[in-house]
């Protein structure tokens, strides 16, 4: 089978990095990059990547002959994008912090990419902490309280992300609550203007009763190894257990594409999105060949 054709909605940091990743994939190619207002720089970058580009947004995507659509626009716009594509035979991968779609992390429940047609990547913070929280929840009797604090460099936070900060906090917290069963979840985020720009980091604090400390260490390392298969700069740089309190620090540096090292937030969510779409492509190929 030829590579599946993909469209990207959004011409910001996420969208253009996605286009580059898609064209480097053995299973996917970027046929279109669409936005509502495309800058000259975005036009040049997309042209260099061999992608068509349009300033007509979702209208151009609906007309395009594509198999997968990546929404890297905004949470506010995503509902309309899904409504426009719901009846189409496409996989919609949502990188905005909206509340639509099945929340998916490749190493936790990536199998859903084989059956669901509307996937939510939650947020960059969610992609960073959910694999570790899954290990914590799986190696304890119950999780009562979770706090997640993410820190990201200002230089790699676009205007849409800044506008969607409330949605980012809400959907990340909802995903953590769904995964861990914790009744108490708090998510905080800071955008750091520091120079040199710091790497993307997430600090996890969880009250986990009956935690199996010896098993947890191995489970967390296995979870990190699995994430590194698609995001090689992913590290659990600290892990401690004191009584029922578990603390972990996750750092993500960008090691692929043209991203600066500090743009780990872009790296992990885009890498996860492409990984899920490639899983869909493999599943579809097997189904067609069978």
Image: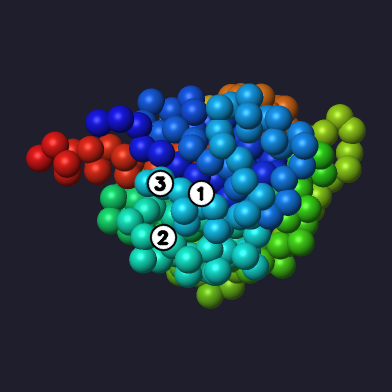
* SS under mark 1: strand
The residue that label 3 is drawn on is 65
Quote the CA–CA distance across marks 3 and 2. Answer: 18 Å
Residue 235 appears in view? no
Q: Name the residue beneath numbered marker 2.
A: 118
What kind of element bears circle 2? strand
Q: Front-most of 145 and 288?
A: 288
Q: Residue at x 77, y 37 (%)?
A: 40
In the figure, residue 161 lies in which quadrant? bottom right
Percent of width and height locating residue 157: 76, 46
Going 41% across and 34% down the picture, which residue do you hit? 28
x and y, in percent, of residue 50 in the image:
56, 27
**Structural distance between the alpha carbons of marks 3 and 1:** 14 Å
| Residue closest to the eye, 257 or 289 | 289
Q: Nearer the viewer, mark 3 or mark 2?
A: 3
Q: Position of residue 244 (x, y in %)?
A: 54, 59
Q: Label 3 neighbourhood size at 10 Å, few (<14), some (14-19), many (20+)?
A: few
18, 44: nearer the viewer:
44
**Are the residues at dot 3 and dot 1 in contact (C-beta closer than 8 Å)?**
no
Residue receiving disc 1: 70
Inspect this view and state whether residue 40 appears.
yes
Q: Which secondary structure, mark 3?
A: loop
Question: Relative to residue 269, is residue 221 drawn left or right?
Answer: left
Picture residue at 25% right of the left edge, 31% below the top = 1
Tell me if label 3 and label 2 are in contact, CB under 8 Å.
no
């Amino acid at each position: 089978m030829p590579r599946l054709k993909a469209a990207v909605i959004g011409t910001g940091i996420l969208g253009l990095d996605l286009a580059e990743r898609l064209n480097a994939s053995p299973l996917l190619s970027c046929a279109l990059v669409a936005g509502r207002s495309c800058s000259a720089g975005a036009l040049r970058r997309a042209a260099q990547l061999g992608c068509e580009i349009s300033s007509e947004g979702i209208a151009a995507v609906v007309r395009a002959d594509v198999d997968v659509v990546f929404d890297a626009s905004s949470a506010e716009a995503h509902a309309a994008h899904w409504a426009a594509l719901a009846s189409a035979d496409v996989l919609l991968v949502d990188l905005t912090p909206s509340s639509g779609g099945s929340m998916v992390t490749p190493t936790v429940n990536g199998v859903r990419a084989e059956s669901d047609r509307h996937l939510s990547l939650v947020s960059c913070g969610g992609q960073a902490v959910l694999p570790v929280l899954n290990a914590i929840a799986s190696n304890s009797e119950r999780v009562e309280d979770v706090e997640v604090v993410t820190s990201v460099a200002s230089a790699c936070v676009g205007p849409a992300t800044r506008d969607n900060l409330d949605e980012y906090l809400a959907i990340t917290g909802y995903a953590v609550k769904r995964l861990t069963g914790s009744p108490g979840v708090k998510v905080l985020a800071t955008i750091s203007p520091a120079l040199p720009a710091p790497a993307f980091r997430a600090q996890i604090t969880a009250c986990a009763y009956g935690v199996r400390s010896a098993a947890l260490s191995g489970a967390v390392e296995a979870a990190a190894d699995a994430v590194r298969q698609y995001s090689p700069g992913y590290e659990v740089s600290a892990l401690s257990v004191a009584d029922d309190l578990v603390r972990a620090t996750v750092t993500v540096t960008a090691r692929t594409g043209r991203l600066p090292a500090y743009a780990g937030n872009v790296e992990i969510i885009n890498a996860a999105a492409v990984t899920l779409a490639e899983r869909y492509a493999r599943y579809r190929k097997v189904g067609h060949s069978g």
